[in-house]
Image (tube, grey):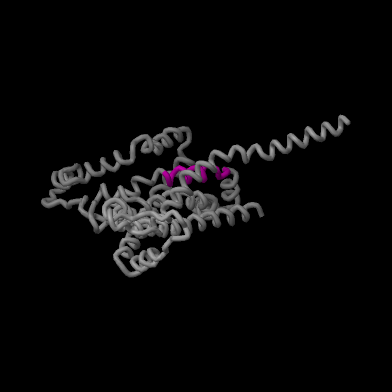
Amino acid sequence: MPTNLASGADYDTVGQRRWMWPGFAIPGVVWLILLFLVPFYAIFAVAMGQLDPVIQRASPEWNPLYWDPTIFAEAFADLLGGQLGVIALRTILYVFVASALCLVIGYPVAYFVARKAGRWRWLWLILILAPFWINYLMRMMSWVNLLSPDGQMNSLLINVFGVVDPPNWLAGNDLVVILGLVYGYIPFFILPLFAALDRIDDATLEAARDLGASSSQTFWRVTWPLSRNGVLGGLVIIMLPMFGDYYTPNLLSGSPRTRMLGNTIDQFFNQTTSQGSLGAALTIILMIFVAGLMVYYLRTINRATQEARR
């Protein structure tokens, strides 16, 4: 009898442990349902709804039985051969160039802090985290003050280099928008890359040197492959929000020549309200494209994990 009681108690304990951790996940699941799935459904309802003829505004259709997907055909046609296609290509170009610059600038910084900073590492980490203490809008406004026609950049060109007619940096300059994206998102790239570089065991690098590898060979054959997941993780973290960014081009340009997809979606919803369905459809297409990048990243991480276990 006592044995049976003990077995029952053990069974209850196992049952409690089995449901304990899923129970902790319930608040997060509810959070995702309320703040992701419900808004996502609302976007679908707007995309497949109708235009209200009275107020000239997109009217959502909440019943899936009455959804009309023809708006997606219009969106794809415009993306493949219309003005939206030009804006989409410009957005992809901006994001990939800005991401490449983040890699070129951020990797040496993360490598130095993780492998070479020594006892001053904490100070460098504080400097990297410092931008997070300042509102993004305020940081962009500092660029506006720097690059305005009477700002510090033009004052430097006039007073030091003798430029008579300095350029207007905030009037549709592609490079300014790209550099603004780099400035805004590069801390998000450095931090996960720093974590990946910091996890590399010093014994692994010493073993490579003991086997006769030079410093450059050790980096390319050991450090770089082991940090590649951190690079991919950092790129995903910065590229996903870059594709939807609209305030950086607005603040640093405001010109149609530098408009990104985020600006177009914002215009469809807030300015040309009769095209809200097209804006919602474009939002869904952009989400699918970004989800493809995320799937590629997850598959790469999974493949690397399996190879490491072998």
Quadrant occupied by the C terminus: bottom right
Image x and y of residue 87, in percent = 31, 61
Question: Is residue 90 visible in the rendered structure shown here?
Answer: yes
Q: Residue furthest top?
A: 2
Which quadrant: the N terminus?
A: top right
Instruction: Note whether residue 160 is visible.
Output: no
Measured as percent of width and height from the top left, residue 156 is found at 18, 44
Residue 281's x, y, as percent?
39, 59
Q: Name the residue located 37 percent from the left edge and 52 percent from the top edge.
A: 244
The answer to which image quadrant residue 143 occupies is: top left
Does residue 30 belong to the magenta stretch? no
Please report the bounds of the magenta region as a residue range: 188-201
Residue at the (14%, 46%) spot, across then down: 158
* Percent x, y of residue 296: 51, 58
Instruction: Decide which of 196, 260 is in the foreground and name it.
Output: 260
Which residue is at the front of the view, 271 or 285? 271
> Is residue 133 placed above or below 293 in the rendered structure?
above
Residue 195 part of the magenta-drawn span: yes
The residue nearer to you, when weighing 140 against 244, is 244
